[in-house]
Image (cartoon, helix red, strand yellow):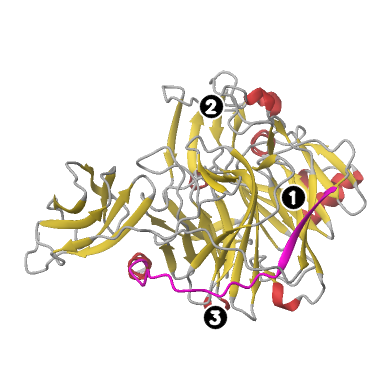
């Protein structure tokens, strides 16, 4: 039923109406001095009583191109850190005294994690496993007692009693993100990657995208804990996402959920997705009528909601992006470079989205694989969206950004200069300052394409009609309710102007209704629901 709800939402209005944007704030970024603090990226974090808990991640910069030098074990973070940003001090404890499976997973990169109350849930992650003599994605989920572990690290006492770990192959995921709505946890996107990284493929690894939203609850009183009410939603086109930003959202009527922002890689091209996907407890909605041109890779982000004006603002800090601004011009670079860009995506009362360039930049080409650590003394929703309307102060400390990858050049990977990149030790305090600034024009994120599909309902074939201003690459995918691609291809012999193409539908019992997705220019997606004519059953 939730898959059907997705389809109906997908086909709802795509006309973008005029919006009155209200974000009267300047953004202020201030460095915080923390002598000798090591640089880290791609880690997990939690906090308690003003102190941060940092687990996992890497101490080197961007991974190398060659399999024998990518993700070396020597650069795994084998320490757990506790940071007191107010007092400017930190403590550490090694994981090496823990049991084998636990210590190996706690030094992974690109794990999936979420803090829920006093517990940190930590799943998957990728790293070298000495016990298996290979790089793997770890098939475990860990529950961490955050206050207890923080105290043990600070007091330099035994840390082993503050972890519980169970084996579960469903959690062998890296590069995904976790959320929680009500009592249900969400593990969204990501992939299972086992073996040595190789940028040109080859036999050194196996990789499988989850293409899923995995939903479950945790029963704390069964063994150390247990996974219950597990279910999946599969979509190999729209949910094929990893290394993206999952931003908590407040939707209409203050309904809580999340937005998948961008991520990599498209099924038909080694390029980021540009359109987001909304997630609520009712289902998910690909927002293909809107493209986000700035911020396409996992990095620091935060969500704030203005209840008075019913506007949800998502802020993105630096990172990597297929597009960036230079001298006022939007530049496209398909190498997806490091950027300094800070941007905002605003969701309006009617659900429409607009993107804005914020006229402040990161101090350098940084922010990728960094984390935003929110100020939990602010009024917040359960999903950690800040309640902007309840704050009356002129200056708001939203939180801090710690770590990430820092690069001196935009494209060190493509230029074989990954050795010039580093794990950033910097901490930045992020403030919003109220100011009657003039309106900033939005970036045009509209989708210029639409398609007409007929007949609908269909018997054994459909005709797809669309208009092109110029001939361009155009791919299509047919998926069924089970999340399977039943047919795919590329439209050829196109012409400027009106195009009509016929797709023969394979005869299969699972075909009651289908999703047809057309991809124009590896950039614009259009999805339509098509129904099987029940007068002509299979």
Q: Residue at x 48, y 50 (%)?
A: 189
Where's the C terminus, which quadrant? bottom left
Neighbour tally class for label 1: few under 14, some 14-19, many 20 plus, Cα within 10 Å: many
Q: Main secondary structure of the magenta part?
A: loop
Residue 377 image position (x, y, % from top left): 80, 67
Residue 106 image position (x, y, % from top left): 68, 39
Task: Mark 1 and mark 3 in contact? Answer it, CB < 8 Å.
Answer: no
Q: Residue at x 30, y 56 (%)?
A: 482
Relative to 155, is 17 above or below?
below
Local secondary structure at mark 1: strand
User: Foreground: 404 or 467?
Assistant: 467
Local secondary structure at mark 2: loop
Local secondary structure at mark 3: helix
Q: Residue at x 14, y 57 (%)?
A: 463
The magenta region covers 10-31
User: Foreground: 360 or 110?
Assistant: 360
Query: Which one is closest to the eye, mark 2 or mark 1?
Result: 2
Q: Can you tell which mark lies on residue 253?
A: 3
Res. 159 image quadrant? top right
Q: Which residue is mark 1?
A: 401
């Amino acid at each position: 039923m939730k898959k059907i709800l997705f389809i109906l939402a997908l086909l709802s209005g795509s006309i973008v109406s005029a919006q009155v944007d209200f974000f009267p704030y300047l953004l202020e970024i201030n460095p915080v001095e923390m002598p000798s603090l090591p640089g880290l990226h791609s880690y997990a974090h939690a906090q308690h009583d003003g102190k941060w808990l940092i687990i996992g991640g890497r101490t080197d910069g961007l991974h190398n191109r060659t399999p024998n030098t990518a993700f070396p074990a020597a650069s795994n973070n084998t320490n757990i850190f506790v940071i007191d940003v107010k007092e400017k001090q930190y403590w550490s404890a090694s994981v090496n005294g823990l049991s084998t499976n636990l210590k190996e997973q706690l030094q992974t990169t690109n794990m999936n994690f979420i803090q829920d109350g006093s517990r940190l849930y930590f799943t998957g992650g990728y790293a070298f496993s000495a016990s298996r003599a290979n790089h793997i994605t770890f098939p475990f989920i860990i529950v961490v007692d955050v206050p207890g572990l923080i105290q043990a690290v600070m007091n330099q006492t035994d840390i082993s009693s503050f972890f519980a770990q169970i084996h579960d192959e469903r959690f062998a995921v890296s590069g995904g993100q976790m959320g929680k709505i009500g009592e249900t946890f969400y593990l969204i996107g990501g992939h299972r990657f086992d073996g040595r990284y190789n940028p040109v493929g080859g036999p050194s690894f196996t990789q499988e995208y989850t293409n899923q939203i995995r939903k479950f609850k945790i029963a704390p009183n069964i063994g150390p804990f247990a996974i219950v009410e597990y279910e999946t939603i599969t979509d190999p086109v729209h949910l094929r996402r990893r290394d993206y930003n999952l931003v908590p959202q407040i939707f209409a009527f203050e309904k809580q959920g999340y937005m998948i922002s961008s991520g990599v890689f498209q099924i038909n091209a080694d390029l980021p997705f540009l359109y987001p996907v909304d997630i609520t407890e009712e289902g998910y909605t690909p927002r293909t009528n809107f493209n986000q041109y700035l911020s396409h890779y996992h990095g620091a982000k935060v969500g704030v909601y203005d209840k008075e004006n019913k506007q949800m603002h998502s802020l993105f800090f630096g990172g990597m992006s297929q597009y960036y601004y230079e001298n006022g011009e939007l530049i496209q670079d398909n190498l997806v470079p490091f950027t300094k860009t800070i941007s905002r995506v605003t969701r309006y009362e009617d659900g429409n989205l607009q993107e804005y360039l914020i006229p402040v930049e990161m101090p350098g080409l940084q922010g990728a694989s960094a984390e935003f650590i929110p100020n939990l003394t602010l009024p917040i929703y359960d999903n950690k969206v800040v309640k902007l309307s309840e704050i009356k102060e002129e200056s708001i400390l939203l939180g801090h950004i710690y770590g990430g990858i820092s690069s001196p050049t935009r494209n060190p990977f493509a230029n074989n200069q990954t050795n010039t990149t580093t794990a950033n030790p910097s901490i930045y305090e992020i403030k919003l300052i109220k100011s009657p600034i003039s309106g900033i024009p939005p970036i045009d994120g509209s989708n210029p394409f639409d398609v007409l599909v007929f007949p609908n309902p269909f018997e054994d074939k459909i005709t797809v009609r669309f208009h092109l201003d110029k001939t361009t690459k155009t791919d299509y995918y047919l998926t069924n309710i089970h999340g399977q691609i039943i047919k795919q291809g590329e439209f050829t012999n196109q012409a400027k102007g009106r195009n009509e193409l016929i797709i023969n539908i394979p005869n299969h019992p699972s075909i009651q209704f289908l999703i047809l997705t057309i991809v124009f220019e590896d950039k614009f997606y259009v999805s339509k629901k098509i129904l099987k004519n029940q007068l002509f059953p299979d």
